[in-house]
Image (cartoon, rainbow, N blue to C red):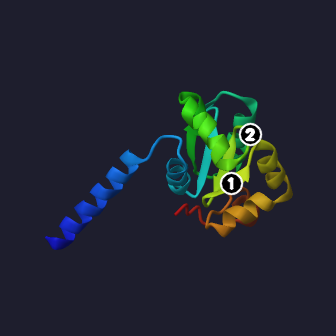
Amino acid sequence: MLAATRLLRTSALRSVRWCSVRVGSKEYFDDLVAQKKVVVFMKGTPNAPRCGFSNAVVQIFRMHGVEYNAHNVLEDETIRQGIKEYSEWPTIPQVYINKEFVGGCDILLQMHQNGELIEELQKVGISSALLEAETGQGDKSDK
């Protein structure tokens, strides 16, 4: 019973913290980029990108078979401007791997082309489908 009470308190405190975090604040973005190993702030959604650069990022991750959280910056101007301030990067899309800002479309494309993306994904325990296709091995673990 005591363990269940502690679990409920911990969950409640997390919920209160999330609700008390102002949208667009540093803490807000810290929480978003920590929710999954790969996070993308983009225009549109993975199923319906609203710009060519966001579409390119979606296609690159699709080729690698990477699961990620996507946040549509067009839904909220506070998020759209806030993520630019958070990363100190002026353009969208923005890619985060393991809570670290990687860059935008051009940087991700370059990493994809020179093999760096596969290396960065491996560092966080994500195996690229492209590598698996070449070697016939790998684990799609995302956690």
Camera-nearest residue between 138 and 42: 42
Q: In the figure, residue 50 lies in which quadrant?
A: top right
Q: Residues within 10 Å of mark 1 (few under 14, many from 20)?
A: some
Identity, as a three-letter code, of the amino acid under mark 1: Phe
- Assign a secondary structure to mark 1: strand
Residue 52 to residue 85: above or below: above
Q: Residue at x 79, y 53 (%)?
A: 112
Identity, as a three-letter code, of the amino acid under mark 2: Pro
Q: How many marks?
A: 2
Asked if residue 88 can be seen in this view, the reply is yes
Q: Residue at x 60, y 66 (%)?
A: 139
Residue 16: % across, % down: 32, 51
The residue indicated by pointer 1 is: 101
The residue indicated by pointer 2 is: 90
Q: In the figure, residue 116 lies in which quadrant?
A: bottom right
Camera-nearest residue between 49 and 15: 15
Asked if residue 45 can be seen in this view, the reply is no
Left or right: where does residue 32 sit relative to residue 123? left
Left or right: where does residue 25 sit relative to residue 125? left
**Contact, mark 2 vs mark 1 (Cβ under 8 Å):** no
